[in-house]
Image (cartoon, rainbow, N blue to C red):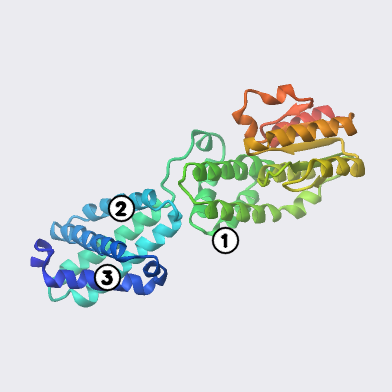
Amino acid sequence: MSLLMNYEDQRFTRIAQMVFEEQLRRDPGLESQMDERRRKMMYDDVVYNLSFLMTSVYFSDGRIFEGYARWLYELLCNLMKDLDRDRIMEIMTGHYRIMSEILADHAPEILTGDELGKAAEYLDLAIAVTTEAVTDIELSTSFSEGDYYDIRKAYLDALLRSRTKNAHEIIRDARKQGVPLEHIYEKILRKVMHEIGELWHRNVITVDREHYATSVTQTVMSGFFDEIFESPRKNRTLIACAVGSELHEMGIRMLSDMFEYQGWDTFYLGAALPGQAVVEAIGEHKPDLVALSVTMPPYLSSCEGVVKAIRAAHPGVKIAVGGQAFDTTDELWKKWDIDFYSPSAGELLRWAHKTFAA
């Protein structure tokens, strides 16, 4: 099999050129982004990929190309930070399919039938390991600990692989199997979304993936609204919002849903709410409790201003604060005139149950 031993052989370079051109033809966006230098680099990569495949075929050892494909995927994820892991997986699995098609059509004169079969088998292996690698990432200890890890991981994998329907089914099935709704919110959805945020912070996923995960999770949560609003009322009222210019609202929305599920009448005011608007809403709805959320530390000062404004205008209302921003502080909340700091919706619910028991 001279093709494997001489990568300057015209038959080899012809196949590499066909793979290269077909890749550009199927993905016009790639070509528009490339100058001559990048085109040369991409062609060299095609040659390199083919050389690893041919070596694997030559020695009848699929692990050579399988390991190379896994290594190559992670390398590209580190080099191409502007692309999501899922997008890089699509590019590379598409590349391996093109290689398989080109080899099947144009390599019979230089590869035996048995060798072509091995090449196809090893390319299928590369597609499989690359697809699996999308979710083969280091996760935080906090994500891996506690109940429902299997459900959390399955839901996270679905989000990372853009499997919207599957994500909905995972959570819906968990509820059907008897997982309490508060656990779905607190121990599954909240922890998954926190992990999504950490992966974005570590530059493992792109911001559009984080936004997609948020959108899917919001839709998943909306599927429980009928159950949430069927709960008997307790004649208690909550106002909840993210203050200042804060745009991260997932946590505070989860909290609002959980209070509604526990029989409270909740007024979820959304994100990026001016302090004066919060004060006016309190005057209108007369809540028993106001919950304020801050995710990003720069908005802590805005939250402090809202707390002071509420205290001045409505001194009798209970105030609770929470959100990831407080995790970065030295117990900053202790310096504020609030009634409770809560790191989670569950803790605030338990505190509210004791405080407002009547």
Q: Give the residue number, with chain letter if any, for mark 2.
A: 72
Residue 291 or 300: which is nearer the viewer?
Answer: 300
Residue 47 % position (x, y): 21, 63
Q: Are circles 3 and 1 on residues that touch, CB within 8 Å? A: no
Above or below 108: residue 276 = above
Residue 19, which numbered label?
3
Residue 354 % position (x, y): 81, 27
Above or below 5: residue 152 = above
Report the residue at 38% width, 67% height from top. 30
Q: With 172 as the anchor, is 53 left or right in this view?
A: left
Q: With 191 as the anchor, is 344 left or right in this view?
A: right
Residue 232 % position (x, y): 85, 45
Amino acid on which disc 2 is placed: Leu
At label 3, counting other C-alpha atoms closer than 10 Å, the crowd grade (few under 14, some 14-19, many 20 or more) is many
Q: Secondary structure at mark 3?
A: helix
Spatial CA distance of label 2 from label 3 is: 17 Å
Q: Give the residue number, with chain letter if any, for mark 1.
A: 165
Q: Secondary structure at mark 1?
A: helix
The C terminus lies in which quarter of the figure? top right
At label 2, counting other C-alpha atoms closer than 10 Å, the crowd grade (few under 14, some 14-19, many 20 or more) is some
